Image (cartoon, grey):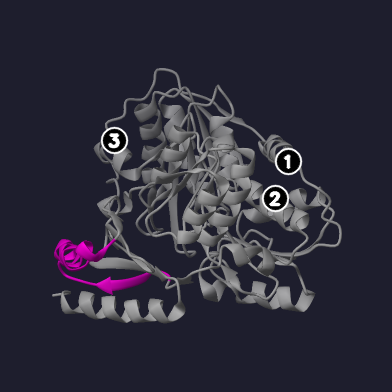
Amino acid sequence: MARSPKIPESIFRSYDIRGTTDQLSPELARRVGAATVKFTGAKRVVVGRDMRETSPAFARAVIAGITSQGAEAVDIGKCTTPMFNFAVFAYEAHEAGVMVTASHNPAEYNGFKMSRGDGFPISGEEIKPLVLANSFQHATRAGKRKTLNVMPEYLERVFALANMPSLKGMRVVVDAGNGMGGIILPKLFKRLDCEMTPLYFEPDGTFPHHEANPIKPETLEDLQGEVAHQRADIGIALDGDADRIGFVDEKGQFVNGDHMLALLAGDRLRAHKGGAVVWSPNASWAVRDAIVRGGGRSVFEKVGRIHIARRVQKEKAAIGGEVSAHYFYPEFGGMESTEFTLLLVLKLLAESGKSFSELLKSVRTYATLGEVNFEVKEKDAVLAALEKHYASKAVAGDKLDGLRLEFKDWWFNVRKSNTEPLIRLNLEAKTSARMKEKHAELAKFIESHAG
């Protein structure tokens, strides 16, 4: 009997299971399928996949694991992660799901996103004991596999909620990054009357043009160049499984994820009076300001897809979002819908009568550093030293996720990496000079305590 491959524990993460393809195997995928059934007690489990080269084999193995436990596998084939989430939560008969994807990671990665029947994610850490134990008993009668095309119904839901105006005369450039957005975007834009220039819509798991990561500056260069060439009104980029969406304005300037959240929060609060907005301690004061202007309720939550999604569900929030360009909606089970986000932004732009950069002026009001990593030996000791030195001077603060301290004209947040000897610094100030001054000051302080 062949020995089972050794499964590295490092692949079990807070939000999913993910690793390089030499760390993964069909045997692992089979166990993930079986463990999802055992963990949830589901009788029907949705299985989707992205376009990576190993995804078809891994999806087949996941299905084999599901059916070995007597459950039915609902195979939706190639899909975006938002389509997968919809297939899980919108169908009452579907009680769990497994999506084969490594999201925005490079070609040498793959992984698994698992979810319960309400669409809420199952973490890799939750399912890890079952996968490693591999103590599954085959059901007396194996389950069956059936197929389902979820895209038409998903698009209907997206358009029914968005209630789009005419976009006539608008020029849009979209970079799908050879990811899964390429299968749905042509159908979405066919229903809009704007001019759309596509970049890299052919799904290709080798990512021949650039990494599909819409918040990485080097991955946006082609999009920015095409926006300038087409004299477009807006540029849009998606990641590999299309659960992140990034934007550039008509001048080619990247729009920070938290600035987009602030813009979207203002819009959503007009329709959801007094609603909650879920955001994280590394995000801009622009989000806070948008919530105050819109009469909403501010809800802080830890950084991370699972944390934000859970809180959006719990609070029935108007919207939740992250600096990493994930945006979450109650209408989609508290999960992401990049397609809905895309329509909301195009609608906002059309109805404003302004250029995208003018529309963004209300949220581009602070000088933001962006996330900077520092290598340190004793992470807790550095956070304690920062708190001791700065807390008494702060006007507000919390320790929900690392340490966030706010002052009259600036704030900072420092968080520990879960997997590396790093702390992550985010900082913002009312002026660029103040931001640079405080960045230099904090960098010197952290490095002096790095050990």
Q: Select label 2 or label 3 by which is in front.
A: 2
Q: What residue is drawn where x is 30% and y is 38%?
A: 126
- Alpha-carbon distance for marks 2 and 1? 8 Å
| Residue projecting furthest to the top | 140
- Local packing at callout 3 (Cα closer than 10 Å; few below 14, some 14-19, many 20+) is some
Is 105 magenta? The answer is no
Residue 103: in sight, yes or no? no
Q: Is residue 169 left or right of residue 323?
A: right
- The front one of 246 and 167 is 167
Amino acid of disc 2: Leu
- Residue 282 rendering spot, x and y as whole percentages: 39, 60
Label 2: element kind: helix
Q: Earlier in the sequence, mark 3 or mark 1?
A: 3
- Alpha-carbon distance for marks 3 and 1? 40 Å
Residue 317: in sight, yes or no? yes
- Residue 417 rendering spot, x and y as whole percentages: 28, 61
Amino acid of disc 3: Leu
The boundaries of the magenta stretch are 370-394
Which residue lies under the disc numbered 3?
A: 130
Looking at the magenta stretch, what is its main secondary structure? helix
Amino acid of disc 1: Phe
- Alpha-carbon distance for marks 2 and 3? 40 Å
- Local packing at callout 2 (Cα closer than 10 Å; few below 14, some 14-19, many 20+) is many
Q: Is residue 379 above or below residue 302?
A: below
Label 3: element kind: helix
- Residue 377 rendering spot, x and y as whole percentages: 16, 70
Which residue lies under the disc numbered 1?
A: 159
Label 2 with label 1: CB-CB less than 8 Å: yes
Numbered tag placed on residue 343 in the rendering = 2
Q: Earlier in the sequence, mark 2 or mark 1?
A: 1
